[in-house]
Amino acid sequence: MKTLITNAKVVNEGKVFDANILINNKLIEAILPVAETPICDKLFDAIGLYLLPGCIDDQTHFREPGLTHKGEIYTEAKAAVAGGITSYMEMPNTIPNALTQDLLEDKYKIANEKSLANYSFYMGASNDNLDEVLKTNPKKVCGVKIFMGSSTGNMLVDNERVLEQLFSKCKMLIATHCEDEGTIKRNLEIATKKFGDNIPITEHPIIRSVEACYKSSSHAVALAKKYNTRLHVLHISTEKELSLFENKTPLKSKKITAEACIHHLWFCDEDYTTKGNLIKWNPAIKTAIDREAIFNAILNGTIDVVATDHAPHTFQEKMQVYSKAPSGGPLVQHALLAMLEKYKQSKITLEKIVQLMSHNVADIFEVEKRGYIREGYFADLVLVDLQKQSIVNKDTILYKCGWSPFDGYTFNSSIHSTFVNGHLAYTNNNFDETKKGLRLTFNR
């Protein structure tokens, strides 16, 4: 089956150009001038649309197994595809935690049957599973996740000896959640003494403070430098942490890389008064100064990746008092739209968005044949309409939890169509689920 996408404005590898793209089954067979229209089985006219490589989201929580009342691989992968995300990497803090190779493979089996998008799952680290971590196949698993801050179940790694062993012995990419647990506990005690059971959400960035983030991130970076570890620090939320990362070294030569998330680029602490617990994330959304610094860091190469940290909870769970409301929220359907909105505001180029959400993720994780529009690569592609608006409301939200922190917002772009492995999985608000996504593989 050959499909020809004609008249597209392609955004790829730092350029915007007109081209026709010939897809042969799962792969891109040819990138052609618009005047060339070879024989094909299916013609897709993309006139007026921009063609981007599908986004690769390096941090998601799809809640399966064990937490499927919030979200599941089937529902959240569909929402991702509708948002132009063709591949995702999912975290191990499900129930049970993915702390053994068997439990990790159980998640791959679920995705193989249910996921519309391509997928990989992190191996989880704890204080007592080093042997299991070291069994992880670097060619078939995206990375090892270490929570250097509180998490679900048995996943806080706070034993210094274990951290030293993980950073010295693990030969594949380590991704870290960095918040210092001791600092957070002390700040929470202060807030509890002051407010009792009625801690306001505005205290969240004070409890999960700049100091908590920097202390943990600097510790991770120091360990990585000591042992020459391949480290990727997730969801940077403070200006202070930016001093830990380089922007002069080419990405392919970096041993230590960093990620920013949509919510830290979009919201600030002033938004707690209107959004409340709906924007309660860990690490916390902080000041407008932090937000501006993080945005500048994605532009100048200090931060290498933009992702979501998609982590749905039910609306009822989020409406509880601060101390009981869980942290996290759904973002995969609207992440690319949010970045396109920044483009419409002249704050970032289309080429830079593609670099941060596709190219760099593929390079950092050494994803095989994805993240670029290249001949011989998988045809993971997204067509966006920069002239058509997208309204976020209960009728358009696809997350199982049924809400979005962008509820009520109108984006000035839309996702027209998404191809996953050459299969037109989504177009004009309709899905074709006859083919599922594939397990990501890695050139390591």
Image (spheres, rainbow, N blue to C red):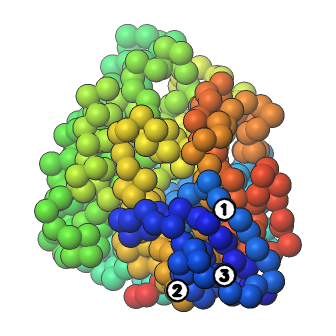
* Foreground disc of the pair 1, 3: 3
Looking at the image, residue 314 lies above or below residue 439:
above
In the visual, does 84 lie left or right of 348?
right
Residue 157, located in which quarter of the rendered image? bottom left
Q: Which residue is mark 2?
A: 375
Q: Which residue lies most toward the front here?
A: 35
- The circle drawn on residue 46 is 1
Residue 142 x %, y %: 48, 74
Amino acid on which the number 3 mark rests in the picture: Thr
Q: Secondary structure at mark 3?
A: loop
* Foreground disc of the pair 3, 2: 3
Q: Is residue 347 visible?
A: yes
The residue located at (43%, 43%) in the rendering is 343
Amino acid on which the number 2 mark rests in the picture: Glu
Q: Which residue is mark 3?
A: 37
Q: Secondary structure at mark 1?
A: loop
Considering the image in quadrants, where does the N terminus appear?
bottom right
Q: CA distance from mark 3 to mark 2?
A: 16 Å
The residue located at (47%, 74%) in the rendering is 372
Q: Is residue 175 visible?
A: no
